[in-house]
Amino acid sequence: MATRRSRATWLGAAGLAAVTLLAAGCSGGSGKAAATGASTQTSGVTITVALPTDPPPQAALDAFKAATGITVNWSSSDWDSLQTKISAAATANTYFADVTNVDWSRVGQLGKLGWFLPLETYLDGNGLKADMPQLASFTLDGHIVGVPYDASYMVTTVNTDLFAKAGISTMPTTIDEYTNDLKTIKAKGVVANPLNIPFAAAEGLSTYWYETTQAFGGTVLDAKGKPQFTDPSSAGYKAAEWMVNAVKDGLVPPGNINVNDSQGEQTLMAQGQAASTFSDYSGLINSLYNVTDSSTVAGKVQYLETPGVSGTALNLSNPDGMGIPKQAKYPAAAAKFIDWFVSAQTQADFSGLNGQDKVWGSSFIPSRLSVVQQLSQADKLADGERLAKMLKTASPVFPDGAPTWYPTFSNAVYTNLHAAATGSMSVADAIKAIADVANQQSSNS
Amino acid sequence: MRDVVAEPDRVDRSGSAARPQRRRLDVLPYVLVAPVAIFIIGLAIVPALFTIIESFFTVNELDPPTRFSGLSNFVELFHNHAVTNSAANTAFYVVVGVALSTVLGIAMAVLLQRPFRGRGLVIAILILPWALPGVVEGILWSGIFDPNAGLINNLIATLHFGAGNGVLLGQNRLLTVGLIELVQVWQMTPLSTLLIFAALQLIPEELYEAATVDGANGWRRFLSITLPLARPGIAVAMVQALIATLNIFDQPYVLNGAASTGSSVTMETYFVSFQNLNFGQGYALSLVVALVTVALSLLVVRFIYRRVEL
């Protein structure tokens, strides 16, 4: 039986544990201090890499470990959950990962919040910039918040077989030609609804509108965050109108009001039910449309230089990047990992230039222009020449960086455009609602 | 708090009366309870207090520093159209979800009340929807509701009831909320059934036999015996359904995205907190949801729950 003394010891221990737990619970809320005790060690350490993608081949990570002494613990998570984890960890000032996702759309927010370490202190920013056109999307006030590892950008894809069945042999170069071609395909009954626009209230719809706005020759917001789409003659307004009219005219399947981008690609484009996606993801021909297990249109889809008002338009860059959270335990080791991951050699390996065993399934398009050109020359990228050409001119949605309030703005974009597509509000009202949010947020900031 | 134990006065060996000893504090029960208490305090009480306090502050990562703002978070929320719209949707989820899952739960529990061959297997199968995560159910049902290639539209086309390209979700608000809630009811009903079923198992068979002898038919026995004596189970089932429907997130988010036709209050809490990084308003909205949950649960307990002694 326990003595009084030992009981007192137990009680003390329990009390201490309770106080510790309470202190831990209370400390997370408002701490803003940078992580303390981060190690500069770059060998013999294990870093956690949290990205919304599957890991690269284990052999590649093993080779990295052999060269640097850094073990990589890869943590995969879906994009939305990862953004929540990043916010929660940074707000609570707790460690979460050494390397994680930096999405272009959150660069403004993340840059202002100071949640990520400036990478120019660890990496050769100028060297990267020369070979990575999309690095600009990850730079804010001269600080590199993240480095793109996948040069995703928006492109137009067309099913040439369906176009040919409608008697169209010359691909459109303007938005009017493009629209007329789609109407011809529908009128001739080749497919009932030839255009894929993912109208589900999700980020993909916002991206589609940005790309279409760019095709109509305009921008969404100015450098101060003020809306540039309220005038009916503006590109953004016309883009919204064009998209909603496409639903009304039956060019878009009615069910697409609840279809997100990946569903549209998989169930419509890949199954030959849609003839074109105006704002599609670069690299999908390789990773989806030409994969016979999941596609019935292998060899029939090609990229199309984005049809604009009076000729081809610029493409919208939509890259995925990685950065180092301020609470990282091993920032120096994390920087070494990023340097290795985006190096020309690794990107070439991941994209299949040096053998299939080194291919990283998730690497659609290398972020280095030089590697894309090598791929194209080696004929290892479907429609590679056209892709490489478009990558050179891919430009960000917000040339001056995404505003800090971008998530609020995007939410307004996709919920209101979705509502306009369902017919529950007019395009004018949707545009007004989106503009109100932009005006309010830009004034507040 | 001191726990005192009365002890008889002692007599020492010399036979003289001993001085009464102080009653001893027995710490062992406290030590044994401490781990659980610490977890409850650390993971429930402290965050709850933190939420209550911070809901009266401006806690916005993009608008530092944290500062007292009184009721402004609550006022702004009630002027936020997205929040009021999602509150209306959530009210519909609650009414339909609680009513439907309770009625179906009672019906299924009554069907399972009498032993029959394979009842264990039926119960095991019944639990499956409840065991599935909400996101998985959302994905599963999105395949059923899909307007382009969904099961329902395929059936409609196959049976020549229509073209089979009807838009089920996203276009009509009432239909959208109804179908989303149907998915949640599909998930919740097994638990409601089991809770009510457990209550039914405690009803002595003799009561039914006596009622039968008195000439009561099946419906009369159900109204006079089953329903009154199952009220504790029904109340618990209703409270769990209430909590689930008030906090619905996975199903509308997966099935209908962020669209206003199906968004719930919990979804708005997520958007306000983790998209806009306005944690003060997020705390305020969470607090409102928690208070509504407690208030409605108390109402259910007050009007449905009855202590049953058999």
Image (cartoon, coloured by chain):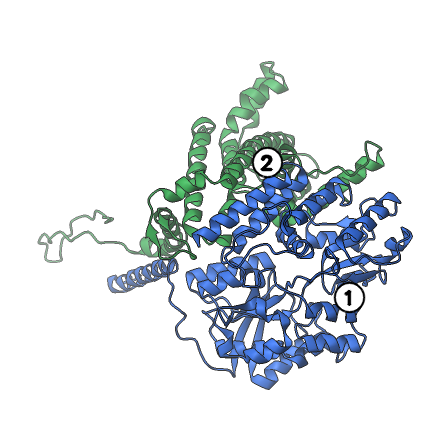
Chain colours: A blue, B green
- Please tell me which residue is depicted at 80% across the width and 52% down the height of the picture: A177
- Location of the C terminus of chain A (image quadrant): bottom left
The residue indicated by pointer 1 is A286
Q: Position of residue A118 (x, y in %)?
A: 48, 73
Res B120 visible:
no
Measuring 83% from the left and 37% from the top, which residue is drawn there? B157
Task: Measuring from the top left, give residue A157's x and y in whole percent.
Answer: 77, 58
Regarding residue B69, the answer to whether it shows in the image is yes
Q: Nearer the viewer, residue A373 or B18?
A: A373
Name the residue that disc number 2 marks.
B193
Q: Which residue shows up at 51% across the image and 55% down it?
A: A225
Asked if residue A160 is positioned above or below residue B141 in the image, the reply reads below
Q: Chain of mark 1?
A: A
Residue at 63% across, 74% down: A132
Dot 1 and dot 2 within a common chain: no
Left or right, A47 with respect to A345, comes to left
Q: Secondary structure at mark 1?
A: helix
Q: Is residue B305 above or below residue A289?
A: above
